[in-house]
Image (spheres, grey):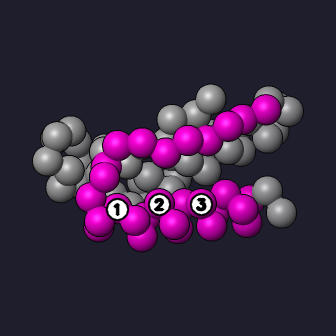
Amino acid sequence: MYNAGTDIMAGDPLSGLNISEDGVIQRDELVIRSASDNNVPLCMVLSGGYQKCNAECIAKSIQNVFELLN
């Protein structure tokens, strides 16, 4: 189970972290590649970062996951 929250993004009012959109996508890619390379089943769930501005980052990350696995 991989909790791919976006509350780590820059500007999130609760986390205080400063991760860029590219950083979130790279994080997700690292987890997906590692699981795939090691034949580990993975369930990716979304959480945190419930701001409207995070939607584009989430969509890009999911699109990247599909491209990695196909």
Task: Give amino acid for label 2.
Answer: Ile
Q: Residue at x 67, y 44 (%)?
A: 32
The label on residue 62 is 3
Point out residue 30 in the picture as x, y percentages from the top left corner.
Answer: 61, 44
Task: Give amino acid for label 3.
Answer: Ile
Q: Residue at x 23, y 54 (%)?
A: 10
Left or right of residue 28, residue 49 in this image: left
Point out residue 60 in the picture as x, y percentages from the top left corner.
Answer: 52, 68
Q: Which residues are magenta?
A: 41-68
The label on residue 54 is 1
Q: Residue 57 falls in which quadrant of the image?
A: bottom left
Instruction: Quickly name the residue at label 2.
Output: 58
**Are there few (<14), some (14-19), or many (20+) residues within 10 Å of tag 1?**
some
Point out residue 34 in the picture as x, y percentages from the top left corner.
Answer: 71, 37
Left or right of residue 13, residue 9 in this image: right
Classify mark 2: helix, strand or loop: helix
User: Separation of disc 1 and disc 3 at Cα?
Assistant: 12 Å
* C-beta proximity under 8 Å, tags 2 and 3: yes
Dominant secondary structure of the magenta stretch? Answer: helix
User: Separation of disc 2 and disc 3 at Cα?
Assistant: 6 Å
Q: Is residue 64 magenta?
A: yes
